[in-house]
Image (cartoon, rainbow, N blue to C red):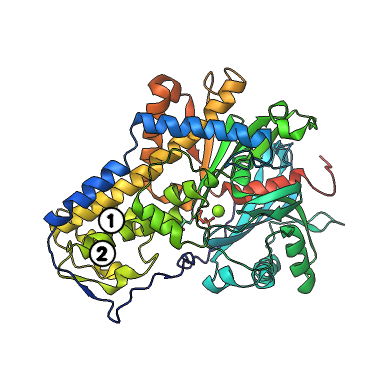
Amino acid sequence: MSVVATATLPPVVGSFGIGRSRRGVSRIKMVVRSGVVSVAPILTKLQSECATPLPVLRRVADEMTADMRAGLSVEGGGDLKMILSYVDSLPSGNEKGLFYALDLGGTNFRVLRVQLGGKEERVIATEFEQVSIPQELMSGTSEELFDFIVSGLAKFTQQEGENFHLSPGRKREIGFTFSFPVKQTSIDSGILIKWTKGFAVSGTAGKDVVACLNEAMKRQGLDMQVSALVNDAVGTFAGAKYWDDDVMVGVILGTGTNACYVERMDSIPKLHGSFSPSGRTIINTEWGAFSKGLPLTVFDRDMDAASINPGEQIFEKTIAGMYLGEIVRRVLLKMAEEGAFGSCVPEKLFTPFILRTQDLCAMQKDNTDDLQAVGSILYDVAGVESNLNSRKLVVEVCDTIVKRGGRLAGAGIVGILQKMEQDSEGLIFGKRTVVAMDGGLYEHYPQYRRYIQDAVTELLGTETSQNVIIEHSKDGSGIGAALLAATNSKYGHDY
Ligand code: ADP
Ligand code: MG
């Protein structure tokens, strides 16, 4: 398998405006009190408000299950949209040929090609490239964004190596992973409901995103064919299922978050009886919009109020990578104002999204006696001067927010699993069941991963949870989209 170099640029953060007036001219605010002692109550309050003991986890899991049912009953029945993916047949392993995938996430844009060799050879070769999405495109026009995507794709297509062979008479087919809420209208079309994750691109909401892509391809003279439109959770699911038949759920924890799962067609009342041949389909939950029973703080509420989508995507804002660093920044700012880091509030600490989830991860990994890495990150990123006591305090804050996020994600997973088990006893807990995970947050944050597992084990008990395997499916969403393009090929199957 060959993999070409990836061009990974620093991730771009979301576009919350600074928004809040700080009135005075000087951004360096003098504080009256000083010292870590005076901010201890802020930490204690934060820890108690963010606590996720078993009853809280259970309530979240149960509310998730209930909201899934509500969303399946009628359109708009609950927070969860429970969108039909139109993925009714999954890759079987027999797929052959050259397929492309485009993956537009919240931070990164990836292009990928894969040469499939059927049951014996499986994935013969893959190549991919990744670029971060320029900040200005996140609030530009639809045409600008799709032109950017297509020009990346066109460049990538020109470098197709000798391991890749297009069958004669075919166009190159694409699986398009589009990780925003889409009302799917068929396997290869869907209307953007709204942007999330800090995107505010004009002119796309209400439009078919495949048509937007096709128009951009036409503008640039690129003759390719979109055969499948999927979101990242569905792509991850399909990519993982290709290798492991026990995969029942796909979850994304990256810039944003989402989950999908296998549903029985007869458990979807809003379908009014239109069934696929297999009797099953993949439901895209759009669980980022979930909001019930979550332990929230003033910092969450303020961040939400300053966001471009206030009142929306509350689960996402509590557990996903785009937001964890920002919540911590808001807590640290409050602590700085109370004198935790000396007599001044550093200017940088006022900047929304200056502290990234990657920084929290790096701070939590610091195991030096004097928390040297924590000190440097605080200073370099946020201009905060710290001593050992204040560094310990910061690590506690990070852990509080990350623990809440990971545990709530775990409760969400259990909510999905228990819904499936309730409808088909023994389907989930009576055998090995795999939850395929992907996304930068899950991949790179070991502590967060542990918190997910802790919550799942606490909720299900040691014995049952042993049947539930939470597994990283690396880059599953890209490969999965290419596989779904193959399964849904316009040229049928010649294997
Ligand atoms: P996308 O969401 O665009 O599909 P990814 O799945 O790669 O992209 O997720 C990127 C996000 O993952 C970043 O925005 C960040 O929140 C999170 N992330 C990336 N690296 C790390 C890290 N080392 N530690 C914690 N979180 C990380
Ligand atoms: Mg993604």
Residue type for callout 1: Met
What number of labels is visible?
2
The relative height of residue 1 versus residue 411 in the rendered view (above or below) is below
Q: Is residue 357 visible?
A: no
| Residue 189 visible in rendering | yes
Q: Write down the quadrant of residue 49 in the picture.
A: top left
The residue where tag 2 is placed is 378
Q: CA distance from mark 1 to mark 2?
A: 9 Å
The residue carrying mark 2 has its beta carbon less than 8 Å from ligand 1: no
- Placement of 178 over or under 448, stated as above or below: below
Residue at 46%, 69% (x, y): give it: 17
Kind of residue at disc 2: Leu
- Count residues near mark 2 (Cα–Cα under 10 Å), then give few for <14, some for 14-19, many for 20+: many
**In the image as oriented, which residue stretches furthest toward the bottom?**
25
Foreground residue among 488 and 215: 215
Q: Provide residue 275's location: percent of width, then percent of height.
A: 79, 31
Indicate which disc, 1 or 2, sits on the residue closer to the N terminus. Answer: 1
Q: Secondary structure at mark 1?
A: helix
Q: Is residue 129 left or right of residue 458?
A: right
Looking at the image, residue 179 lies above or below residue 290: below
Q: Are marks 1 and 2 in contact (CB under 8 Å)?
A: yes
Looking at the image, which residue is at 33% across and 73% down? 22
Farthest residue, direction front: 23
Residue drawn 55% across the image and 24% down it: 428
Q: Position of residue 2 (x, y in %)?
A: 59, 55
Residue 363: mark:
1
Quadrant housing the C terminus: top right
- Residues 84 and 293: in front is 293
